[in-house]
Image: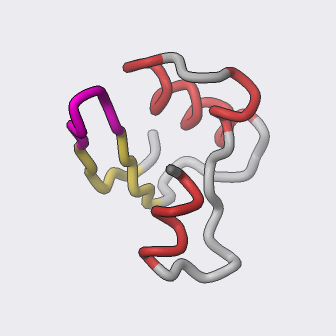
């Protein structure tokens, strides 16, 4: 799903995309905060950066928001 979203948004190669699901698997509602934490901890993103968060759930439920990273 992540790769499909990246292609659909036609993101530049310089845009950092979390790949946490490949390491931790589907952690349900914790997926987005875990991926955000890993990006910050690894230095791939910095405090104050803008981030597009997208989450998917059962029944084709989804949500997205843009935040400033803490």
Q: Position of residue 25 (x, y in %)?
A: 64, 22
Residue name at image x 45 percent, y 46 percent: 69
Residue name at image x 65 percent, y 62 percent: 16
Magenta segment includes 49: no
- Colour pattern: secondary structure
Position of 26 with respect to 19 (left or right) is: left
Residue name at image x 64 percent, y 52 percent: 45
Quadrant where the C terminus is found in the figure: top left
* Range shown magenta: 56-62
Residue name at image x 43 percent, y 75 percent: 9
12, above or below 70, in the image: below
- Count the marks: how many? 0
Q: Nearer the viewer, residue 59 or 70?
A: 59
Q: Position of residue 59 (x, y in %)?
A: 21, 31
Point out the residue furthest to the front here. Answer: 59
Position of 36 with respect to 24 (left or right) is: left
Q: Nearer the viewer, residue 37 or 58?
A: 58
Magenta segment includes 59: yes
51, above or below 69, in the image: below
49, above or below 47, in the image: below
Position of 52 with respect to 27 (left or right) is: left
Position of 19 with respect to 8 (left or right) is: right
Q: Position of residue 63 (x, y in %)?
A: 23, 44
Q: Position of residue 13 (x, y in %)?
A: 69, 79
């Amino acid at each position: 799903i992540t790769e499909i979203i990246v292609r659909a948004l036609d993101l530049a190669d310089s845009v950092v995309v979390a790949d946490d699901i490949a390491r931790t698997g589907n952690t349900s509602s914790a997926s987005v905060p875990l991926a955000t934490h890993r990006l910050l901890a690894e230095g791939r993103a910095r405090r104050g950066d803008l981030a597009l968060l997208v989450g998917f759930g059962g029944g084709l439920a989804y949500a997205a928001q843009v935040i400033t990273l803490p």
